[in-house]
Amino acid sequence: TSSFSSSTGFIVNDKVVDTPVIVHRSANTTIYRQQNRGIKVLSSNSSSTDRMKLQHEQTISQKLPSSCHKRHVLGITIFHGQNALVFKWANGITLKEWIKKMQLHPQADLKVRLNAALAIISTLRQFHENGVVYNHLTIDNIVLNSSGGNYDATFIDLQEAVDINDVGGGADSGAGLNGTGPVEKTMKRVDLVSLGVVLNQLFQGDIGVSDEVTARSIDNHDRKKRGKKLAPVEGLPLYLRSLISALLLSSGENADTECYENVDDVFTDLKVFIENRNLQKYSLDDIEHRLKLDSDIFYGRQVQMLMLMDLFQSVIVLGDQPTIAIIAGGPGTGKSTLVNQIKKPLEEKG
C-alpha cells in the first residue's frame, strides 16, 4: 500500500503522480484521471465494507491475466486521507456513451454493432475462462475502444466480480472454461442474462434500461415481466433476435433446455452470423409471411392421397369385392384432415 505524501499528487510504486482531474462522482466514490492512470477514492463516510471492496477489486484484477481486457489495478493508496484504488486508465468510451453516439447515425451499418457485440462477448469469455464471473455487466461498466475498424471491450469496476473458486465452484463443480458444475452454471447465467440485456440495448440503441430492470431480468420468478420489458428489438434478422432471446431467458426452470449455458456458444453463434451473409437477410416479418399457410390446402400427404385414390379406383373396377383402407397414426398427424381432403375428389367421381 502506498501513501499520500505530496501536496500535488500521490505516490504509486515510488513515483509521484500529478494532481488528477475529477471525471466521476457518486455517493460513495470519486474517480479521478491523470493521463493514463485513474484513482477511485472512497468518500469520508466509507465503511469497512467499502474498503474491503477496494481490496477485492485488486484481488480479482491480479487473478485475471494481463492479456484480459479488465481494469488493471496498480495498487491501493491513501489520497487526501481516504482509501483509494489506483488503476490503469482504459482508453475509449463507455458503451452507454457509444450508444448515444450511434443514435446520431441510426442508419449505421449493422456490421459496426456486430463488431462491438463480438468484442463484449470476447471479454466475457476471458473472464469465464479464468474462473471469474463479472456479475455486474451493464452499459456503464463496459468501455469500448475502436482500433482499425475493430473493437476492444474493457470491463471496469471489478467490485462485484466473483472468483468461482471462492464460493464452492472449485474442482468438484467444474470451475474454469469447461466447467459443468451446478454452482458455476448458475453463476455464469447471471452474466449471460446481463449480456442479453446489454446486446439488446446495443442493437436497439436504448440506454434507458435501469439496474433494477436488469436485476429483475435475472429473477427466476419474474419471467413474464422480463419478457415484456426486455423483448428483443424489432427489425433485427431472425437469427440475431433468437440469439438475444435465448440469452434473456438463460435463467429459470427451463433454462437447461431452452437457452445458453456458456458464453463460448454465444461467441460461436455470433461468429456464424457475422460470417454468413444469408443469415442476415431474413427478419422475423419475412419468415412469418412465408409461413402463412392456406388452411384449405393439404400439405405433405400427396403420396397417401394417391394411394387412397388408387384404392378407390380399384373398388370401382372390381365392382362388389369388399376392400378396407385403415388410416393409422398418432394424434395430430393429419388422419381426419386426410379423410376430409379425399371426400371432394370422391364426390366428384360420384
Image (cartoon, rainbow, N blue to C red):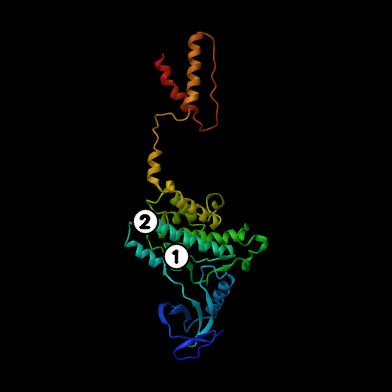
Q: Where 92 falls versus 281 (above or below)?
A: below
Residue plotted at (49% across, 55% down): 247
Occupied quadrant, residue 343: top left
Tell me if 130 is positioned left or right of 155 in this view. right
The x and y percentages for residue 190 are: 53, 61
Residue 194 appearing in the image: no
Residue plotted at (44% across, 86% down): 18
The x and y percentages for residue 69 are: 51, 68
User: What is the residue that sits farthest to the right in this orientation?
Assistant: 172
The x and y percentages for residue 209 are: 41, 63
| Circle nearer the N terminus (2, 1) | 2
Residue plotted at (44% across, 63% down): 151
- Secondary structure of the residue carrying numbered label 1: helix
Task: Write down the residue under mark 1.
Answer: 212
Label of residue 109 in the image = 2
The x and y percentages for residue 292 are: 39, 37
Tell me if 227 is positioned left or right of 134 in this view. left
Label of residue 130 in the image = none
